[in-house]
Amino acid sequence: MLQVRGLTRRFDTGTVALSGIDLDVAAGDFLMLLGPSGCGKSTLLRMIAGLDQPSEGRIDWTAGRPAPGEIGYVFQEATLMPWETALRNVSLPLRLRAAPDAEARARKMLAQVGLGEFEGSRPATLSGGMRMRVSIARALVSEPKLLLMDEPFAALDEFTRHRLQDELLELTRARGCTTIFVTHSLYEAAYLGSRIVLMTPRPGRIAAAFPGQPGHDRLDATYLARVGELTRRLRDLQLAA
């Protein structure tokens, strides 16, 4: 889907966030960008989204850069409009494009993330996990070709986090959506990723890149054992990076 070549980001302060990043992202990947805080993961995501520009290097799109509506972005915080209902928040990308079926599609998307009965609720009345579901629904309602996620579950409790991880896998699979997911959680990378890219501390470089789990049968004890083994391998690689 896209190729990153020689990507470097140097800020005006002199800080080098990323240095010489080479990365291929294939259509249908669930790619995990794993590394410690401050290693440039979010900066790389922003440049792929077009929200920031590289100091050096380039990003090449195999079939042309997706249109703005074909890229979904989920931030670390839910970033919802507090004065609007869940339904209005989810329908926003469609309303901006004057889609005639915006409300119906938003209502269907809310039902798919388990919030159909909360479409009239405002963010202040929803839990943190529910607000993040609304944010994910808003990112997916346009049926994006590429979904970018910047540590969306970092602030959630473990119970909510695991539930949303499973829901996210099901939603992206059903849509054939390519996903790039930023995390500093070793277990989350091993659990979610079809491919995992491990980054070094700043300036961020790629220390290792390898396949994740081939399938996601999360009720299978063998699969969970593989996740545990991969988590330990990632820990060893991270310590050596």
Image (tube, helix red, strand yellow):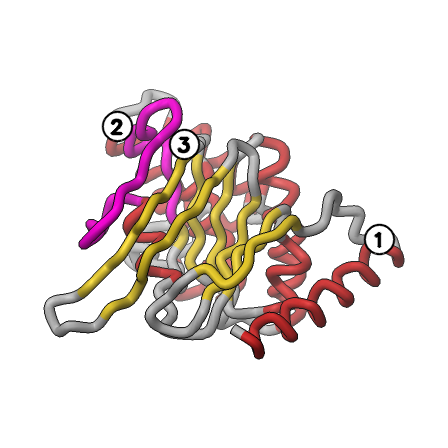
How many numbered marks does the figure carry? 3
Earlier in the chain: of badge 1 and badge 3, it is 3
Q: Are marks 2 and 1 in contact (CB under 8 Å)?
A: no
Q: For residue 61: magenta?
A: yes
Q: Which residue is mark 1?
A: 219
Q: Residue furthest left?
A: 12
Which residue is painted at 88% across and 56% down in the image?
222
Any mark on residue 142, and which? 3
Residue 94 is situated, as x and y percent measured from the top left of the image, at 33, 31
The residue carrying pointer 2 sits among few (fewer than 14), some (14 to 19) or many (20 or more) residues within 10 Å by Cα, namely few
For the residue marked with disc 2, what is the amino acid? Arg
Residue 189 is situated, as x and y percent measured from the top left of the image, at 60, 60
Query: Depth check: 22 or 28 in front?
Result: 22
Residue 153 is situated, as x and y percent measured from the top left of the image, at 52, 64
Q: CA distance from mark 1 to mark 3?
A: 31 Å
Q: Is residue 55 left or right of residue 102?
A: left
For the residue marked with disc 1, what is the amino acid? Leu
Task: State which quadrant residue 226 falls in.
Answer: bottom right
In the image, residue 9 sits, relative to residue 144, either above or below, namely: below
For the residue marked with disc 3, what is the amino acid? Ser
Which residue is painted at 61% across and 68% down in the image?
186
Query: Depth check: 191 or 157 in front?
Result: 191
Q: Is residue 143 left or right of residue 204?
A: right
Q: Which residue is mark 2?
A: 97
